[in-house]
Every structure is written in C-alpha cells, then in structure tokens.
Amino acid sequence: MSIETKITDAAYVRAALPKRPKDANKSTFGRVLLVCGSGDMRGAAALSVLGALRCGAGLVTLASTREVIDALSQSIYEAMYFDIERGDLLAKAAGMNAVGFGCGLGRTDEGSVRLAALLGQSGAPLVIDADGLNLLSETPSLLKCAARPVVLTPHPLEFSRLCGKSVAEIQSARVESALRFAKEAFNPAYGGVLLLKGAGTVITDGARVLINPTGSSALSKGGSGDTLCGMICAFIAEGASPFDAAVIAAYIHGLAAERCAKVYSDYGVLASDVAAEAAKVICTLTAGEETNA
C-alpha cells in the first residue's frame, strides 16, 4: 500500500506543539542531554544547547570535554555541564527525556564506543546528528539493534554513507530513499525517524511522510544543523513524539531562517540568529496567528 506524502503546515505544527500549562515547572518540560563538541568545534555544542533552550526544554545539560565546558560556561549560563571524560555517561543519560549525540564531536574511537553504548541502553529517544552519523555509518548494524527510539538527521552526503546509495541517487528520489530506509533500518521494537535535510526536508518514520516547506539558502551555513538537533531534542523532552518533534523543529527552524533573511539576507544569517528567532516563531504559533504574516 502506497503512503501519501503530505506537506507540513502551520495547523499541524500548532496542534503538535507541546503545551505549556500555567502550573508547570522546569521538570514539566523535560531534561535534555547533548553529547556534543570538541576542541576544534566548540561552537557546534553551543548552538545545539541554544537550540534546545530557545525551544523550551526545562533542563539542558551539555556532556563534553573540560575545554569545551570551560569555554561555553562563560557565556551560556542557563545550561548545566557534565565532564564526559570523568563521569558515567550512561548513568547521566538514564535520567533524561531526550539525548542528542554528535554535533561537533569529531570522529574518534571514544565517540564510537559512547554511541554504541547509548544505542544499547534502553531509555529516552536518541537524536543522532553530524559526526554521530559518520560514526554510525562505520557500524550501521547498531541501528537495527537499538534499545531506544532513534532520530537520524542526515544531509544527503551523510545519508549516502548510511544507506550505501550515491548522493545523486538519493537526490533523484528523496522521498522513496528516505521511506525505504526508515522502513528497513530501525529496530521495529522501538522505531525511528529519518529527517533527510535539504530543500524540501523529508521526515518519515516508515509509515508517514511529511515534506517541510520552510527554509531557504540562509540555512546553508555551518551550525544550522546543530541548532536543529537541539530543537528536536527540546520538543521530544517536552512530550512530543520523535516524529512530531522532527516535524515541528524542521518547520520552525526553516521559518526562523526565512524571517532572519528578511533582516540579514540569505547571505548573512547565522545559526545563532536562527535559534533566537525560533523562539519568536513559537510565540506567533502559540498566539494562533498566521506564521507568514
């Protein structure tokens, strides 16, 4: 049976967006753990943290090296920090509502071990991005044995490494390629979501397909994906399903970039601009206004 491909719209996002009860506290909106950053890519960690914070996660913890923590803690006061080289990562992850892995992490043996351990641990959904995807492509069979729901957020080259198809093959049949992978690659006991980036981002869990209509070339800049990873984690932690969290985040992320481009042009938008503007898009959505007004 064929699966209908639909376009995400503001009504879907507004309905799926986790609500904010007036009697809530920080625990109501979940705990996010982001395993991100390295000495050469501290900014990726910062952007993923900002994405999660700006989209409403109650508590956000960055698990990284001491040098990354020392750098970020001087300017991002709202996050908490966990020294990944000294603490028990699995014990830390066990208390979380969403875990993000890979932004600016680098491709190291330690990273491979940590990813395998997280995939093998039952618990909250795991969002894998950037170097996490590159590490996963070295042992893709880990995905089939995952003991938790998984969200993958590759661009076409990263997806090529995961699925074995060329970028040209993927781009010529984006929906079909993403749908087949989502049907076959994840552990059916826990399920998973594939978010294939690019113009008309494809989001599928193997049973549903939504195409994201927002965004522009303003997002063709380093750091955009890191911000998106943090945003997805935030919406999962707040109670959205992994599929809906990916749909919500992609829509808001793209619309925030469009709005920023009206000020800075597609040339001048920064990923940090998008994180801040995403909060304003949410303000519009929750007010029930038209998002393109």
Image: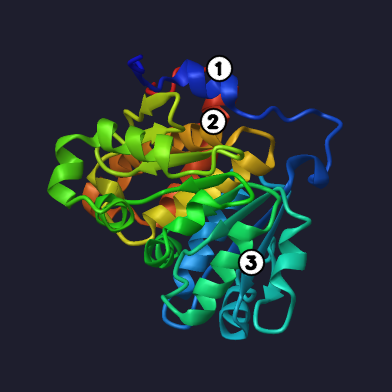
Please tell me which residue lies in front, 243 or 64: 243
Q: What kind of residue is marked 1?
A: Gly
Nearer-N-terminus badge (1/2): 2
The CA distance from mark 1 to mark 2 is 19 Å
Circle 2 sits on which residue? 244
Q: Nearer the viewer, residue 241 or 169?
A: 169
Give the vertical position of 14 relative to 193 (above or below). Answer: above
**Quadrant of the image for the C terminus?**
top left
**Residue 116 location (% of width, % of height):** 56, 66
Residue for badge 3 = 62
Position of 38 with respect to 17 (left or right) is left
> What residue is drawn where x is 69% and y is 27%?
19
Q: Residues within 10 Å of mark 1 (few under 14, many from 20)?
A: few
Q: Residue at x 33, y 62 (%)?
A: 222
Q: Position of residue 49 (x, y in %)?
A: 57, 59
159 or 248, which is in the foreground? 159
Label 2 crowd (10 A; few <14 / some 14-19 / many >=20): many
Q: Is residue 253 visible?
A: no
- Residue 275 percent location from the top left of the image: 48, 49
